[in-house]
Amino acid sequence: MAGPRTIVAVTGEDDRYDRVRRMGTQRALDEHATLILYDLDAGRDPLESPLPTEWSADGTDDVPDRLGPEELEAAGRHAIADQVRGARDLGIDAWGWLPTDDHASALVEYAQSQVDPLILVPDGEPELEDAVDIEALVVPVSEGHR
């Protein structure tokens, strides 16, 4: 059975999801898969979109579904840009994504738009762990064991 072709790993602006990120990086290396770091912090402010909107910028229809370090920097996500750079330094096809909200449905919708996804989520986010209809794709990662 073939492994996943896309690893979607939850990350954040700090190191609280470090274990999830490290597991995602290792799985991407082992599976020769694309790694997408899904910045859960980006969607936590309901009053601010992490990506350009029709009100804030021209050409917003051209926002890609994966962001490289330059686009992440432009969006003010230096920490995530550094995480993507670090994975790329290991030879991984790595990208970031900035969701508009932090609900499980946004993660599910995004992951389902990827090729053969495997989703890695932290144990401490019950809504993400209980994501509907994709239980087989979701792997909770315990943060308590380093």
Image: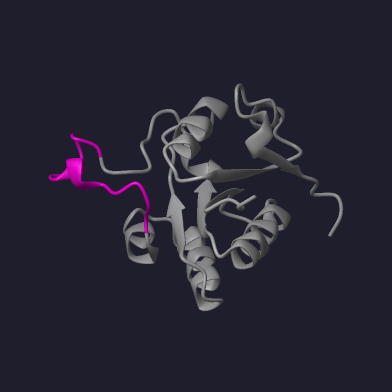
**132 over 83 or under it: above or below:** above
- Residue 103, position in %: x, y? 54, 27
- For the point 56% across and 76% down, the residue is 90
Find residue 104 and report its horizontal and vertical position in percent.
Answer: 57, 28
Q: Is residue 86 above or below residue 65?
A: below
Q: Residue furthest left?
A: 58
Start-end of magenta stretch: 53-67
Specify the principal SS of the magenta part: loop
Residue 60 located left or right of residue 41: left
Number of marks present in the image shown: 0
Above or below residue 84? Residue 132 is above
- Tell me where residue 126 appears, x and y as whole percent: 72, 28
| Left or right side of 55 for 64 | right
Tell me which corner region of the image, top left, top right, bottom left or bottom right, holds residue 40: top right
Magenta highlight on residue 63: yes
Which residue is drawn at the image coordinates 18% and 34% (left, top)? 55
Classify residue 40 as left or right of residue 56: right
Residue that appears at 61% across and 53% down: 3
Q: Residue at x 34, y 53 (%)?
A: 75
* Residue closest to the far front: 1
User: Which sits in the foreground, 22 or 137?
Assistant: 137
